[in-house]
Image (spheres, rainbow, N blue to C red):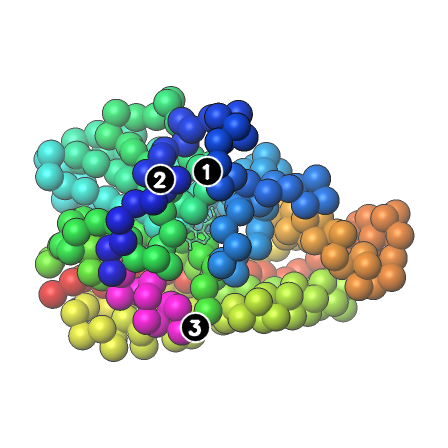
Amino acid sequence: MGKKFSKLSQSSSNDNENELERSNVPKPFKYVDGKRYHNVTSLRYHLPNDGDEFDRLQMQHYLSRYIWQSNFSAPVHELLRNGGEDIRVLDVGCGPGTWILEMSSDYPQTGMFHGIDIAPIFPDTIKPFNATFSIQNALEGLNFPDNHFDYVYMRFLTAAFSTEQWETIVIPELVRVTKNGGYIEIMEWDVKIYGQGPIAKRLMDSFLSDLRSRGINDYIVEVIPEFMEKINQLTNIEHETCVNPQGLYGGQLGKLALDNGISIFRTYKPKFSKEYNMTSDEYDKLIEDFIKEMDIYKPHNITHRFWAKKI
Ligand SMILES: C[S@@+](CC[C@H](N)C(=O)[O-])C[C@H]1O[C@@H](n2cnc3c(N)ncnc32)[C@H](O)[C@@H]1O
């Protein structure tokens, strides 16, 4: 793989939108129903990348770190702590870059933490000295040499790829750019609310049907280990899960998980209210009832981490 950067992908987030406005370079964003999205027409990924989504991703980051009591599971702590100029870490689909910013601050001895995303939504100037970012589409091949990174990380990309893309492009690319002896790690939510009530089921059924209509495998966690095995270049493949309550019954943690769900269902308001033939107020009431219902049914979510060593 390894495509050459296009003019747009060479740019980092210091491209300002006004300059792009005046040029013939494709615009990085499009706006629908007042929300901002990436503008890469070939992609399945459909979640917004505006301020509300940043808040949700930040919240999801702190929630994940709290539930797991760590930012990662692969045994790379010593390596990153000892660091060195040539120790490099990659985060694929880094979003606003929260994981990279924290990791690069936690491990200042490590030479480079690099985040890539299809949209320039990562920090531009204010960042640790060892953190860098670039625009890249993981489905066009990662623009790095073979065996380049000591640790390659990817989190919450379920909504971005089809099963075939996971198997034939994404996981092979993560492995290709990892050094021999280095680690890859994938973290995903399995897109289920366990023990859900009828309102949660209605909203989740609509959400899942939307993902499936885009060719997304919402239960990709089931096949990730198999795809890792198939590459024949990975050993010590590990898989762990963490359960977290969703709803006010679960204290601060349950509230954060609930806020995460509410934020997604609010993003879907234009689509779902149309689907349910509801007014804006009726949909808001449905969300209020969803919140109350979560305290009756006391459901939970599961997140998964997979990690392995490259031979
Ligand atoms: C749900 S967000 C997760 C962001 C981050 N990993 C985190 O945990 O906060 C998914 C991110 O993947 C990016 N993305 C989607 N498809 C991509 C692709 N083909 N290549 C690179 N990034 C992609 C989106 O722009 C978005 O920022």
The residues tagged by marks 2 and 3 sit, at their Cα atoms, a distance apart of 30 Å
Q: What residue type is labelled 1?
A: Val
Q: Does mark 2's beta carbon lie closer than 8 Å to ligand 1?
A: no
Q: What element carries label 3?
A: helix
> Can you give x and y, in whole percent of width and height, for residue 90 in the image?
27, 46
Residue 200's image quarter?
Answer: bottom right
> Which quarter of the figure is the C terminus placed in?
bottom left
Q: Residue at x 57, y 67 (%)?
A: 214
Which callout, 2 or 1, points at the residue further toward the start of the chain? 2
Identify the residue under disc 2. Answer: 7
| Secondary structure of the residue carrying numbered label 1 | loop
Instruction: Spot the residue most to the top.
Output: 126
Q: Does the magenta-highlighted stretch encompass residue 166? A: yes
Does residue 40 sit above or below 30 in this rendering? Answer: below
- Please give the residue where the numbered disc 1 appears in the rendered image: 25
Residue situated in front as seen by the camera: 243 or 238: 238
Reply above or below: 228 against 55. below
Q: Which mark is residue 163?
A: 3
Instruction: Return the disc, 2 or 3, that comes first in the chain's sequence.
Output: 2
Residue 185, image x, y percentages? 30, 57
Magenta highlight on residue 67: no
Q: Nearer the viewer, mark 3 or mark 1?
A: 1
User: Magenta span covers which residues?
Assistant: 163-173
Q: Of label 3 and label 1, which has the lower sequence position?
A: 1
Mark 3 burial class by Cα count in 10 Å: few <14, some 14-19, many 20+: some
**Residue found at x 34% / y 57%:** 140
Name the side, left or right, on which 103 lies relative to 161. Answer: left
Q: Badge 2: how crowded within 10 Å, few (<14), some, or many (20+)?
A: few
Given the image, on which type of amino acid does mark 3 rest? Answer: Thr
